[in-house]
Amino acid sequence: MTSSDSQQRISITVEAKLLQDIDRMTENRSAAVEEGLRLWYRQENENQLRAFYQTQKPTERQFDQNWGEFAQTQMEEILDSEGL
């Protein structure tokens, strides 16, 4: 997925027991750390998105819902008109 040109080397400190456990599961520490960072990043994005929507006012939520329904209706009409 990534080439060496798009990767950067980092240095991290990890608890010894955790590193031993990782080494028992994989021979590629870098891939394990990269996958862990990807999972963390995805979870943080989801948390921020959830927090955003939880702090929305009811009128903002209603606007978003109305807009989503409108967009879906428009897309369905376009697909129907194109025979899809």
Image (cartoon, rainbow, N blue to C red):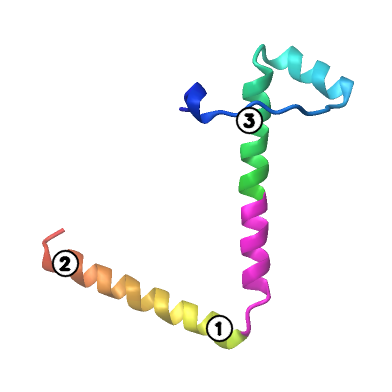
- Is residue 56 inside the magenta stretch? yes
Front of the two marks 1 and 2: 1
Image coords of residue 62 (percent x, y)? 51, 84
- Magenta span: chief secondary structure: helix
* Disc 1 to disc 2, C-alpha distance: 30 Å
Q: Quadrant of residue 10?
A: top right
Which residues make up the magenta segment?
44-57
Residue type, mark 1 in image: Glu
Q: Position of residue 48 (x, y in %)?
A: 66, 61
What residue is shown at x 46% (from left), y 27% (from top)?
Answer: 1
Quarter of the image where one finds residue 46? bottom right
Give the residue number, with chain letter if any, for mark 3: 34
- Check disc 2: other Cα within 10 Å, few if <14, some if 14-19, many if 20+: few
Please check the rendered image and state whether residue 52 is part of the magenta-colored stretch, yes or no.
yes
Tell me the element at label 3: helix
> At numbered mark 1, what does the secondary structure look like: helix, strand or loop?
helix
For label 1, the residue is 60
Q: Nearer the viewer, residue 5 or 56?
A: 5
Answer whether labels 1 and 2 touch (C-beta < 8 Å).
Answer: no
Which of disc 3 and disc 2 is earlier in sequence? 3
Determine whether 84 is above or below 73 in the image: above
**Residue depth check, mark 2 versus mark 3: number of the one nearer the observer:** 3
Horizontal placement of 58 versus 1: left or right?
Answer: right
Image height check: is 33 above or below 80? above
Give the residue at mark 2: 80
Q: Please, what is the three-letter code of the amino acid marked with disc 3?
A: Glu
- Spot the residue most to the right: 16
Check the picture and name the quadrant holding the C terminus.
bottom left
Query: Is 61 in front, or is 83?
Result: 61
Upstream in sequence: badge 1 or badge 3: 3
Q: Residues within 10 Å of mark 1 (few under 14, many from 20)?
A: few
